[in-house]
Image (spheres, rainbow, N blue to C red):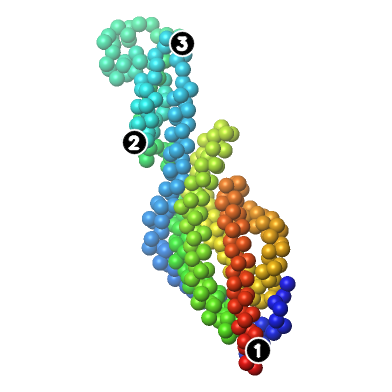
Amino acid sequence: MPRATDEDLFQSSTMTFGEHLEELRTCLIRASLGLAVAVLLGLFVARPVVHLIEQPLKRALGDYYTSAALDTFDGWRPRVDGGTPLPYSRDEVVDAVERHGLSFELREVHPDRLARVLGTAPSVDAAEDAPAPTTFATDDLVPVLLWQPLARDPRVSITTLSAQEAFGIYVKAALLVGVVLASPWIFYQLWTFVAAGLYPHEKTWVWTFLPISIGLFLAGVGIAFFFVFDFVLDYLLQFNAWLGLDPDPRISEWLGFVLVLPLGFGLGFQLPLVMLFLERVGVFDAAAYAAQWRMAILVITLVSAVLTPADPYSMLFLAAPLCLLYFGGIGLCRWFGGEATGAVQATNASQ
């Protein structure tokens, strides 16, 4: 629904439609130049950023393979009744994994063959003169646990499949840093363009909305990186385990995921300000937003599915705060709408 007042939004503006387009072009050029400068700065810190981005994935892979190893440990049984048990208790294994940061693989060996290879068998010459066995003695196998630091476990390392892929990763990391660093400047340019079409008494709102807009964007990025990633990765890796597939992730694919999800969250968190802008230009009002809340939740769910990867966790983690922000946007429209109506009435009365 349009606003109650029939005053033209651009009545007090001296800019023509072409001048508004020129202003938009100027703002976009300035925003692009600021982004380019921020990306150049990001090239100097891209390397530690790549290592920082790796941490959630390495942590999730470590938890995945540790859990799989413990399941293997719990499910292992001697091949024959009375056979050799596992050389460690479960409490020792859990202590080694959780307190000492070790990982292990459960293997089986023939102890006499291993002793012969190591040269520790008591009668090596006699064993060499004995006839070679013709069958494999599975019942003589005994379990061993092969230990190594989790950080050096090859299954936890993140791989590249080509020589040039590392350079692409470096540039993507610089781009991510550049977007975050340039976000205040980009939002400032966008709000400068919006301010050109506002009433004189509304132009001061830009300085109120600008820090809110930047804060919402950074909050969305922070929530995605520090909270959502762990849940999404745990879900995806558990789904791999359910299918019986071991993940072998590439850093370039993971970095693409890191780029999309935080930016999707940051842009999605602009919802209250978009609602307020549409209310200001007369497209909707607070009553219309409140009446269509069911449709809005459906649209938010669909948009969240588009802005996030194909998993339910990331979609729900974006849709839930957006629903709260939608109702916050309704309150914002009612608050500023009441102030704007009073200001417009006061202006008309003075004229």
Tag shown at residue 271 = none
Above/below status of 282 relative to 57? below
Amino acid, disc 1: Asn
Label 2 neighbour load within 10 Å: few <14, some 14-19, many 20+: few
Q: Quadrant of residue 192?
A: bottom right
- Residue 53 in percent (x, y) is at 44, 52
Above/below status of 132 relative to 185? above
On screen, residue 3 versus residue 314, left or right, reads right
The first of marks 1 and 2 along the sequence is: 2
Residue under numbered circle 3:
80
Residue under numbered circle 2:
99
Q: Please, what secondary structure does the residue beneath circle 3 have? A: loop
Name the residue nearer the viewer: 122 or 185.
Answer: 185
Tag count: 3
Between circles 3 and 2, the one closer to the viewer is 2
Give how far apart the Cα atoms at labels 1 and 2 are: 72 Å
Above/below status of 292 relative to 98? below
Above/below status of 103 relative to 6? above
Residue under numbered circle 1:
348
On screen, residue 1 versus residue 127, left or right, reads right
